[in-house]
Image: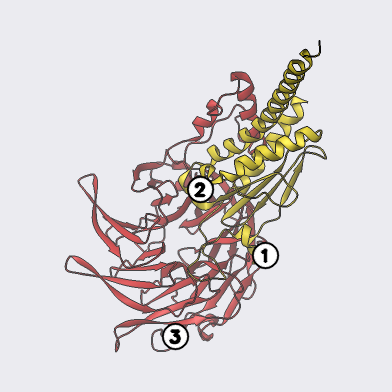
């Protein structure tokens, strides 16, 4: 009901990112290429194909102000692409990784980007003008497993990372010569590069999808144990809350505003979470169409009763090879796991009304919260 | 008896729905490689707790999950020696043609009769609930197949013996 368009681009989409004017989308169709499609008169046409990586491209980010695309791949390489004329030209990035790169994000001021990798390190890359390439500084300590997701704080210095050990850590990434010390950034600005500000041990399963709220007050990340964690007042004494989900785990989360967040995952249905006046986060509703089952009703949210519903339907209609008719109604517009959620609003704005999700089924779905009156109060 | 089979299969189905949340994950040990972590077993943080579902002492199902792969091992009910031999031969026949099944493992895990290995690539190409339907259907059909085979062996034996002994009448 809040999805305004669905586009099927490929068999399977790994990750996607939008251009600054939101007219072009870059995504990886589960291969070593990056396809850029442009929307012209309601039809999507392929504008560019970026081919430089040898293995699957695991992360794409399109910077909003400088119009640069950074891509990272499982082949340990990363490239920064600049649009020169009608072609995208890659610039070399010296990543110094010895294992695959898993995720990437431009910093808010777009002078740095962070790469999380399977080499249990995080690379912060900045541009070196003398040699026309991007060099990296590695955060080598602390992580003892793959870094699955990275997120920049709005102050351009703090970086949050999640890893497959379930820990979420916040580091300082101050680089001399690239960053300037603000007097109002607080204590965190005095930390050296690579110094760990905070470590959160909330999840006992893999952690993904970490994001900061627009003003940087709250941190959210998801764990594979079907929980989503919200941390307020990140600093010496953080306040953490967790919300248990009734379905399958989430993969990624996006902050719509300071008090509202949307999570997507293996349930194929975006979930909306919001904080009330006292700051307690709760699950509000699903955005897409709900699955129907013979035991309908929000209280039967467990998987066992869903399966039980299928069994009842099966015994009524007799066994059939293609399963129960109710299984067909599970296939709403999204059929498979959704793995990536990206905001469609201008960067730096404090609230988002439109966002897009992409997943394993190859669809990019654009959602709009314009008509959801019950959610508008949280914007 | 049919009731306990339904419960067993329902339990397996709901466990599989939770376990089949797989994603592409490059190998942490070897660069540029992508291996099913459940087979590799080198990084304990990437593996989840294995779940063992037993219907009775003779029938059980072990589900081991990791971040990018899932291994399902089945032990099929074998009441007597004849069923033992039939099961072994039938499942060996299937395992040898594992490529055709895609999700089948060529050798069963130690202590079990047949194993499936499902990776994130299978989940990308095929639909998750169809894969689960396939596994559950397979488990239902296996029992039927073995009893049919046993009946046909017995029938054949009876016919052959009757023909042979006719010459002595």
Mark 3 vs mark 1: in front: 1
Helix, strand or loop status at disc 2: helix
Q: Residue furthest front?
A: B168
- Point out residue A155 in the picture as x, y percentages from the top left corner: 45, 75
- Between the C-alphas of marks 2 and 3, the distance is 43 Å
Q: Chain of mark 1?
A: B
Does the rendering let one see residue A306? no
Q: Is residue A68 above or below residue A268?
A: below
The tag on residue A319 is none
In the rendered structure, are the residues bearing label 2 and label 3 in contact, judged by CB atoms less than 8 Å apart? Answer: no
Q: Which residue is mark 3?
A: A175
What hue does chain B carry in this figure?
yellow
Report the residue marked by disc 2. B122
- Residue B39 as seen in the image, left or right of residue A180: right
| Residue that appears at 44% across and 83% down | A182
Q: Which residue is mark 1?
A: B44
Report the label total. 3
Q: Residue B150's image quarter?
A: top right
Left or right of A200 on screen, residue A371:
left
């Amino acid at each position: 009901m809040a999805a305004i368009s669905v586009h099927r681009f490929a068999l399977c989409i790994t990750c996607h990112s939008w251009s600054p004017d939101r007219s072009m989308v870059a995504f990886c169709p589960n291969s070593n290429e990056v396809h850029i499609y442009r929307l012209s008169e309601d039809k999507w046409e392929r504008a560019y194909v970026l081919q430089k990586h040898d293995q699957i491209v695991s992360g794409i980010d399109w910077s909003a102000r400088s119009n640069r695309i950074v891509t990272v791949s499982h082949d340990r390489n990363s490239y920064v692409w600049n649009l020169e004329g009608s072609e995208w030209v890659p610039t070399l990035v010296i990543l110094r990784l010895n294992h695959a790169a898993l995720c990437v994000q431009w910093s808010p001021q777009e002078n740095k980007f962070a790469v999380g990798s399977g080499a249990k390190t995080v690379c912060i890359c900045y541009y070196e003008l003398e040699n026309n390439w991007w060099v990296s500084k590695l955060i080598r300590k602390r992580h003892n497993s793959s870094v699955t997701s990275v997120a920049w704080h709005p102050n351009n210095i703090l970086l949050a990372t999640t890893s497959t050990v379930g820990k979420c850590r916040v580091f300082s990434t101050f680089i001399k010569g690239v960053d300037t010390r603000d007097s109002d950034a607080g204590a965190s600005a005095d930390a050296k590069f690579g110094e760990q500000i905070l470590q959160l041990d909330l999840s006992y399963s893999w952690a993904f999808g970490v994001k900061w709220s627009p003003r940087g007050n709250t941190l959210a990340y998801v764990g594979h144990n079907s929980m989503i964690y919200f941390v307020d007042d990140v600093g010496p004494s953080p306040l953490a809350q967790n919300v248990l989900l009734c379905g399958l785990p989430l993969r990624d989360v996006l902050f719509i505003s300071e008090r509202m967040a949307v999570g997507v995952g293996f349930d194929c249905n975006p979930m909306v979470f919001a904080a009330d006046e006292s700051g307690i986060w709760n699950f509000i509703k699903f955005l897409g169409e709900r699955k129907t089952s013979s035991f309908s009703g929000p209280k039967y949210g467990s998987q066992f009763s869903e399966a039980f519903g299928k069994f009842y339907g099966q015994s009524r209609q007799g066994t059939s090879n293609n399963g129960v008719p109710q299984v067909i109604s599970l296939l709403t517009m999204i059929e498979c796991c959704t793995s990536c959620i990206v905001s469609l609003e201008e960067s730096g704005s404090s609230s988002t009304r439109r966002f897009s999700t992409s997943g394993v089924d190859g669809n990019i779905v654009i959602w709009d919260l314009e008509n959801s009156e019950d959610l508008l109060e949280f914007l | 008896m049919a009731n306990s089979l339904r419960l067993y299969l329902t339990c397996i189905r709901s466990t599989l729905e939770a376990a089949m949340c797989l994603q592409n994950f490059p190998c942490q040990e070897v660069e540029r490689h992508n291996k099913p972590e459940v087979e590799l077993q080198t990084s304990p943080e990437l593996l989840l707790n294995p779940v063992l579902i037993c219907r009775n002492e003779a029938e059980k199902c072990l589900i081991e999950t990791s971040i990018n792969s899932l291994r399902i091992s089945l032990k099929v009910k074998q009441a007597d020696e004849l069923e033992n031999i039939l099961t072994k031969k039938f499942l060996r026949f299937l395992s040898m043609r594992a490529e055709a099944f895609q999700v089948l493992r060529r050798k069963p895990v130690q202590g079990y009769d047949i194993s499936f290995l499902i990776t994130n690539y299978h989940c990308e190409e095929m639909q998750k609930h169809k894969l689960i339907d396939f596994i559950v259907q397979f488990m239902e059909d296996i029992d039927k197949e073995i009893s049919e085979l046993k009946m046909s062996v017995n029938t054949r034996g009876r016919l052959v013996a009757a023909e042979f002994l006719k010459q002595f009448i």
